[in-house]
Structures are given as C-alpha cells and as structure tokens.
Image: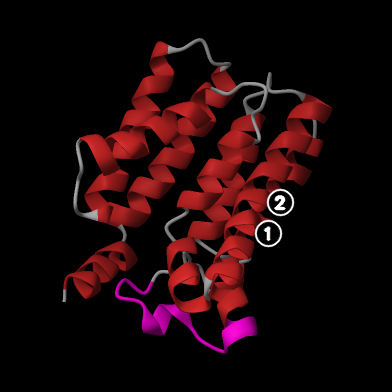
Amino acid sequence: MDYRYIFYMVVGYLAGSVLFALEYPRLFKGVDVRLLSADGNPGTYNAFVYGGISCGILTLLSELAKGFLPVFLCSRQLGMGSLWFAGVMAAPVAGHAFSVFHHGKGGKAIAVSFGVLAGLFPLYRPFVNLVIFYLLFSLILPVRSHRKRSLITFACLGAACFFTAEPPAVLAGVVILSGIVVYKHCISPEGEAREEKAAV
C-alpha cells in the first residue's frame, strides 16, 4: 500500500470538515444559517439565501474546491488504480457530512460531491451522470421533497456506474459517497430532524 493515499484521505476529510456555508455567512453577515433556514442545513443554498450572492458564490466555489483538489491531485500523483482511491473520493464528503470541527455534525454534502466527481477529470461520466439525474428529478420529473430528490438522484448515480466502464476504485468511491449522502438525507436522526423542521 502507498501511504500517500492515507495522506490525501486525511487532507480531504479535514478540508471537507470546514463548513464554508456556515463560516462565510457568519464572517460577512454575522448570521448563522442553521438558525435562520427552514432546514437548518449549513449548505450552499442557504449561504446564497442568507449571505447574499457574493457570499453564495464564494461558498459554492469553496465547497467544490474542497472536493475537487484532493481527488484531482491524488489522481495525478498516484492514479486511480488502487482501491484506496475510493477512500480519497469519499473523504471530503464524509468530512462535510460528519465534520470533526462540529462534533460529527455537518451538511448534506451535495456541492462537495460535485467537486469530488469533477476532480476525476478527464474521467467525466460520474460527474455528468450526477448533473443529469439532478436535472431530471428537478425539472423533467420533479420531486418536490429535497430529501426524496437527493435519495433518488444519488441512488441512480450509484446504480449508473455499474453500467459504465469506470475503474473499480472510482465505482467504489461513487457508491460510498452516494451512501453517505443518502444516509445524511434519509436515515440519520439529523436528516430526519431537518426534514421535519423544513415541513413546518
């Protein structure tokens, strides 16, 4: 085993644990999006709503970057051949969902998942699949509940990879990160509490 994969996993997890959607609105507007938003989620959407456009754009770019950079740099230095690369893909998503800086609590990990999949470039199919499924269930076959839409989207993402010729480590990484997102939205007590709060 090449221990540099462990390095990228640790860096990815720590980067993922920085909740920019919480920190930027607090820094620039003095607000806590968890208290103001209907769902209590420290996510990019709430950064736009409660922090403004500039804060939202900065948050989006930062969330994408913290997923993109560890994956992209690791793939360039070490390649995608080892199954340990799946851990590198999952680490930023796990960090965002279970932040070490916030006692294991975090966000829904949508934007960082896009960043992770973008970091696979020039392998593009997982990223494109995620975009397609989100558009499909947001615009063409709209699912009103964000919770259910994310569940269906990431379930389809995980399933779609089995019908493409992705490297095994990438397939495993997509399945793991999809599982984390589904857990945060649909299984964790934190996700259930957010859904109930948003429905009030």
Identified by mark 2, the residue type is Val
Question: What residue do we see at 49% from left, 84% from top?
Answer: 32
Residue type at mark 1? Leu
Identify the magenta region.
26-40
Label 2 packing within 10 angstroms: few (<14), some (14-19), many (20+): some
Q: Is residue 27 left or right of residue 45?
A: right
Q: Does the magenta portion include 117?
A: no
| Image height of 109 relative to 56, above or below | above
Which quarter of the image is occupied by the C terminus?
A: bottom left
Q: Which mark is residue 10?
A: 2
Disc 2 on helix, strand or loop? helix
Q: Residue furthest bottom?
A: 30
Image coordinates for residue 106, horizontal then vertical, percent: 48, 66
Q: Are marks 2 and 1 in contact (CB under 8 Å)?
A: yes
Query: Mark number for residue 14?
Result: 1
Residue 195 shows in the view: yes
**In the image, 77: left or right of 57?**
right
Mark 1 neighbour density, 10 Å: few (under 14) some (14–19) many (20 or more): some
In percent of the image, x 34 and y 37: which residue is there?
135
